[in-house]
Image: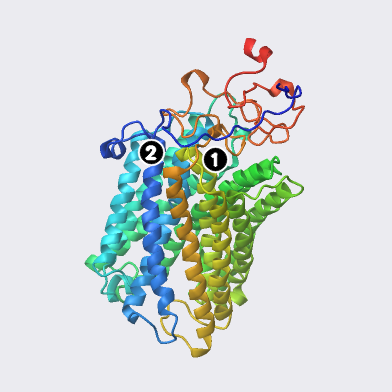
């Protein structure tokens, strides 16, 4: 005897089947290595970037481990002073230029921007593949420079040391960063053109997911700022190779010119790193709180505000470099101003969570970790933007802790939130629920133990980049190194359970999180051209209609509330396919 469900009740979420052969999709469309190396499928290129940046993340993490282990003792524990300089430079170069900058735009932007706006691919598929090859060429040069001796200048490459005094491999390392910049420009151009020209019918600007808005703002910075640092690096190589007086004062150059040009890119580059993470958080928080995003337009335009204002405050890195007091005052005020759009995002995320039906899955835990750590990083940045306190804190471990709270606590947590959120869609497999939540908690705990002590020793005057320090700072450095060990374990755990999910993970449904975006319309993993040719998406509502219980195509979500407006329902069966509204079917 069967009992029918009450009329109008939401359909039960489907039970994921056991692992087995995947349906035809982008993953099994040719298994040879050549089919991957010469692909123009944006999803495969996103996977190529994912594998590449994971390698560089590990390399940068190993360099960071050497730094922290050396600081266990006040006189240096394991390496010489010269090797220490090369280790922290390798850590900075690998993490910044070859992980943080490309992580979300190149991986998730490549993979999901076309799907989220309802199209088959990026605007320039061959240029997309070329961007990966250019990125790998630059990375190969940088890694080669590390393997044959390294660079000892620090990742900021300040002259005249980098152009004259340093005996390390500056030119090949700088050339690698220079080449990889072209990859960043290619990716930014491709994403901007795709968003402008290839949106699905009905996908207006006010219906774009906030992740798309964040990538659009990021691409704007990539296109306008990256050429500046490229020119700067060329001038640095010219001065080092041929002795042309550009930055070296002994040759008639000006070292402040390098700082102005370098930071004109490198401070907006902070937002190249953090804006995509903010977009990920906007997607995850609204999904796992089952609420419409609070203040959609404010969050969207705050991304553009960050992109624009971010170009106007580069010299707050130069308060003690000898710039005019009035210029320093202006840049201090502008540095305060950029906190406004960031605060808008935090306030709106908090309002979205308020009275939401929150589910603490792994993506949500990583996102909450992002918000907490980013708030601490942002508030401590105000001390560095204030002229009086920056004089005391400049070039101390306070700066290191602040930067890592924003970049690692913020961007890396955002990257892991996105990886766990979209992993079922990318691979068609679910990962361990317990271990993913546990890993998120371990990472947050390890992060606090690593970087809170650095705020303390920085406030008390310990300079960064020094291999030796007074004995009274040893306790805090030991605590920081122990925290780094916990953090390393936390980062290792996702590599294990995500890899295992590819082998024995349960099959993911098309929409395992019951989310509203167009990327969840197609099967998991997606077909070659993202959507069924006969069912290309037509957008009829906004990106976060959780209160209505419908996705952007107006189809009922698996856990939609009873009584959602019928005029928006295209209707779906329990498996997410097939119309259930006769009137809609006839029209």
Kindly identify which numbered label has been placed on residue 212: 1
Instruction: Please tell me whether mark 1 or mark 2 is closer to you in this view.
Output: 2
Relative to 528, is 74 above or below?
Answer: below
Lateral position of residue 255 relative to residue 220, left or right? left
- Near-viewer residue (379 or 79): 79
* Residue found at x 68% / y 12%: 583
Lateral position of residue 145 relative to residue 18, left or right? left
Q: Can residue 46 be seen in this view?
A: yes
Image quarter hosting the C terminus: top right
Image quarter hosting the N terminus: top right
- Near-viewer residue (435 or 254): 435
Relative to 387, is 561 above or below?
Answer: above
- Near-viewer residue (44 or 213): 44
* Residue found at x 36% / y 33%: 28
Q: Where is residue 376 in the image (x, y as percent from the top left)?
A: 63, 65
* Residue found at x 29% / y 35%: 35
């Amino acid at each position: 005897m069967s009992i029918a469900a009450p009329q109008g009740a939401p359909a039960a979420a489907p039970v994921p089947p056991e692992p087995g052969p995947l349906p035809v999709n982008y993953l099994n469309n040719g298994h040879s290595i050549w089919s991957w190396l010469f692909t123009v499928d944006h999803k495969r290129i996103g996977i190529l970037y994912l594998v590449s940046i994971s390698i560089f993340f590990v390399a940068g993490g190993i360099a960071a481990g050497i730094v922290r282990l050396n600081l266990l003792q006040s006189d240096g524990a394991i390496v010489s002073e010269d090797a220490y300089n090369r280790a922290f430079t390798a850590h900075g170069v690998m993490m910044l230029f070859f992980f943080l900058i490309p992580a979300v735009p190149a991986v998730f932007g490549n993979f999901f921007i076309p799907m989220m706006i309802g199209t088959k691919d990026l605007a320039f598929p061959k240029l997309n593949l070329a961007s990966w090859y250019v990125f790998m060429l630059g990375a190969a040069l940088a890694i080669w420079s590390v393997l044959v001796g390294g660079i000892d200048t620090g990742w900021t490459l300040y002259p005249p040391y980098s152009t004259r005094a340093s005996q390390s491999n500056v030119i090949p390392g700088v050339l690698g960063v220079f080449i990889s910049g072209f990859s960043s420009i290619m990716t930014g151009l491709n994403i901007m053109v795709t968003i402008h020209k290839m949106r699905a019918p009905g996908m207006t600007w006010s219906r774009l997911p906030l992740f798309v808005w964040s990538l659009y703002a990021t691409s704007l910075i990539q296109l306008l700022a990256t050429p500046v640092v490229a020119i700067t690096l060329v001038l640095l190589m010219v001065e080092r190779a041929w002795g042309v007086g550009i930055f070296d004062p002994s040759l008639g150059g000006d070292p402040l010119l390098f700082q102005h040009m370098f930071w004109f890119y490198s401070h907006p580059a902070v937002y190249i790193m953090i804006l995509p993470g903010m977009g990920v958080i906007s997607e995850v928080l609204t999904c796992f709180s089952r609420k419409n995003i609070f203040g959609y337009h404010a969050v969207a335009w705050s991304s553009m505000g960050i992109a624009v204002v971010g170009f106007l405050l580069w010299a707050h890195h130069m308060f003690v470099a000898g710039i005019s007091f009035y210029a320093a005052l202006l840049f201090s005020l502008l540095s305060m101003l950029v906190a406004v759009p960031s605060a808008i995002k935090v306030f709106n995320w908090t309002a979205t969570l308020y009275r939401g039906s929150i589910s603490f899955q792994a993506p949500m835990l990583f996102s909450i970790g992002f918000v907490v750590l980013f708030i601490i990083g942002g508030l401590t940045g105000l001390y560095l933007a204030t002229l009086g306190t920056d004089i005391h804190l400049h070039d101390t471990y306070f700066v290191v802790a602040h930067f890592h709270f924003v970049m690692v606590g913020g961007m890396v947590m955002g990257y892991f939130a996105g990886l766990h959120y979209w992993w079922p869609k990318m691979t068609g497999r679910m990962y361990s629920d317990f271990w993913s939540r546990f890993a998120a908690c371990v990472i947050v705990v390890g992060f606090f133990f690593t970087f809170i002590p650095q705020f303390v020793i920085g406030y008390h005057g310990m300079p960064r980049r020094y291999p030796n320090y007074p004995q009274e700072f040893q306790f805090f450095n030991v605590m920081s190194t122990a925290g780094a060990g916990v953090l390393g374990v936390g980062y290792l755990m996702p590599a294990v359970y995500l890899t295992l999910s590819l082998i024995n993970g349960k099959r993911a449904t098309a929409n395992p999180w019951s989310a509203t975006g167009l990327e969840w319309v197609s099967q998991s993993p997606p077909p070659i051209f993202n959507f069924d040719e006969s069912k290309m998406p037509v957008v009829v509502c906004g990106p976060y209609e959780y209160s209505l219980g419908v996705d952007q195509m107006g189809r009922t979500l698996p856990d939609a509330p009873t009584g959602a407006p019928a005029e928006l329902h295209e209707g779906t069966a329990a498996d997410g396919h097939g119309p259930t509204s006769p009137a809609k079917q006839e029209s």
